[in-house]
Amino acid sequence: MQQSAVPELAHTHARPIHWVATATALAGVVALSSLLQPKPATAAQATGQDARPAPVTAAAPATTGVDFPIECGPVQALVVRKATGDLDGDGAPETVAVVHCDASMGTPPDGVYVLTRGADSAHARVVATLVDPRTRNTVTSLSVTDGAVLATLLGYSTADIPSCCPDVKDSAKWQWKDHAFIRSTPAGAHSV
C-alpha cells in the first residue's frame, strides 16, 4: 500500500467540538433568517389616465354586540372561536362564530353562526345558523377556506351518552349555493 504524500490533517476527524460549532452556526443562521424577512410585495402603481384608486376592503363583522340565537338563561353567550372570509362571493367578508353559554361547569354545546354587516346598523347580524346548540355538538376546529366553512364537530351517537364524553367525530363543510348554506361531509363521521 502506498502512503499519501500529504500528512493526515487534523480536521478530517470530527470531534464533538466540531459538531457543537456546526450546530451553533446553523442555529444562528436560522435565527437570523427569521429576523431578516423581505417586505411584503406591493402592486405597482399605475400612472397617467389609467390610475384608479385601489378598492377598499371592508373589515369583517365584529362579534361584539351581536344578539346570538342561543338560550343561556342567567349566563352570557361566549364567542369561543371565529373565522372570517368572503362566503357568498360579494367581495365583503363574513364572520363565522362558534358560541356557547359561559357555564361554570360542564361542556356546554356550541352553536355556529354566520354574521354579516348590516347596511343600516353599526352591529353585525346573524344571517345563518350552521350548527344549532340543541344538537349537543362541540366544535373543535373552525376555518374559512376558499369560500367554504370547515369545522370539526364532536357529538353523540345516542341521547344516552353523557355530555362529558362525546363518541362521534364529524368533519363538516358548508358552502353558499342558491341563497343558502349547503352542508357536506368531506370525511365521514367516525367514533372517537
Image (cartoon, rainbow, N blue to C red):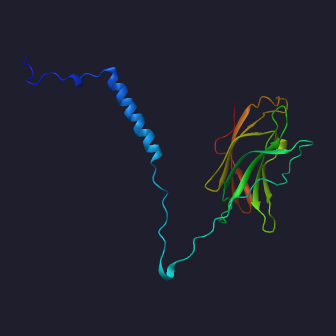
Foreground: 115 or 29?
A: 29
Most foreground residue, 129 or 35: 35
Give the residue drawn at x 79%, y 42%: 110
Query: In the image, is 132 to the left or to the right of 83?
Result: right
Give above or below for 81 relative to 3: below
Left or right: 14 as drawn, with respect to 38: left
Give the residue furthest to the top.
1
- Residue visible at 67% across and 54% down in the picture: 84
Q: Is residue 65 above or below residue 158?
A: below
Image quadrant where one finds the N terminus:
top left
Residue, x 82% and y 41% (percent of image)?
135
Residue 124 image point, x, y percent: 78, 59
The x and y percentages for residue 20 are 37, 26
Q: For the view shown, which residue lies furthest in the bottom direction?
A: 49
| Residue 166, quarter of the rendered image | top right
Q: How many marks?
A: 0
Q: Residue at x 47, y 69 (%)?
A: 44
